[in-house]
Amino acid sequence: MMIRGSWPRRLLAVAAVGAVVAIVPALASAHARVSPAVSLSGKLQLYSLAVPTEKEGLTTAKIVLTVPSGFGIDSFVPPPAGWTQQVQQTGSGDSAVITKVTWTGGKTPTGEDSLFQFLAQPASATTYTFQVQQTYSDGSIVNWSGPESSAAPAPTIDVVSSVSGGGTPTLTIVALILGALGLLVGSIALFSRGGRSLT
């Protein structure tokens, strides 16, 4: 896939639009999740996908992310050591749309999260639902695609058009502010991980 622009230029663009960044909580979640849980439509932002290894004595060896329509992934932070990344897309060049991302080769142990990060721009203010397939070292598969009340719920994020106006919930504003404060941390991570990867 063609690399569009340079990391410094993209990071400046992210900062210029007040992008929010995904910060993985210190306490591991029991579910696969995409964060930040709340972000802004039409803005390039840094997101994280975290998938927990829950089965005792096994490792997570493969993760497949199906990207919802309207959620435009621009580029990726290089995956953690040991992982390789493959992207499926429609179109090419600047009109390319990423539809699926597969990470393989990892060995994330029990009690830890597999973490992947990417810059993306949600097109509209809505709830985006992601499908995640997790494969363990014994070949067993967990499909994170169910409703919120299920044992393996699909990760979701809420995208809002702005934080102005009296109708915006306080928790939404707090989430956006915390994300914005994390932008510096995300920028440092992007530079320290050696730039972008679209392989």
Image: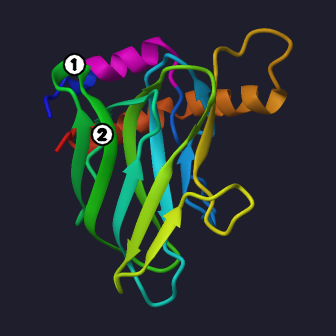
**Quadrant for the N terminus in the image:** top left
Residue position marked by numbered label 2 in the rendering: 76
Q: Is residue 183 magenta?
A: no
Task: Identify the residue at image location x=42%, y=67%.
Answer: 134
Secondary structure state at the residue bearing disc 2: strand
**Rendered position, 170 above or below 112:** above
Does residue 177 appear to the left or right of 1 in the view shown?
right
Q: What's under tag 1, amino acid-wise? A: Asp
Task: Identify the residue at image location x=41%, y=48%.
Answer: 66
* Magenta residue span: 9-19
Q: Is residue 16 magenta?
A: yes
Residue position marked by numbered label 1 in the rendering: 94
Does residue 51 appear to the left or right of 179 in the view shown?
left
Residue extending furthest top? Answer: 165
Cβ atoms under marks 2 and 1 closer than 8 Å: no
Q: Which label is found at residue 128?
A: none
The span from disc 2 to disc 1 (Cα, nearest Å) is 15 Å
Quadrant housing residue 189: top left
Frontmost residue, 48 versus 32? 32
In this orientation, does residue 5 appear? Answer: no
Does residue 161 appear to the left or right of 170 in the view shown?
left
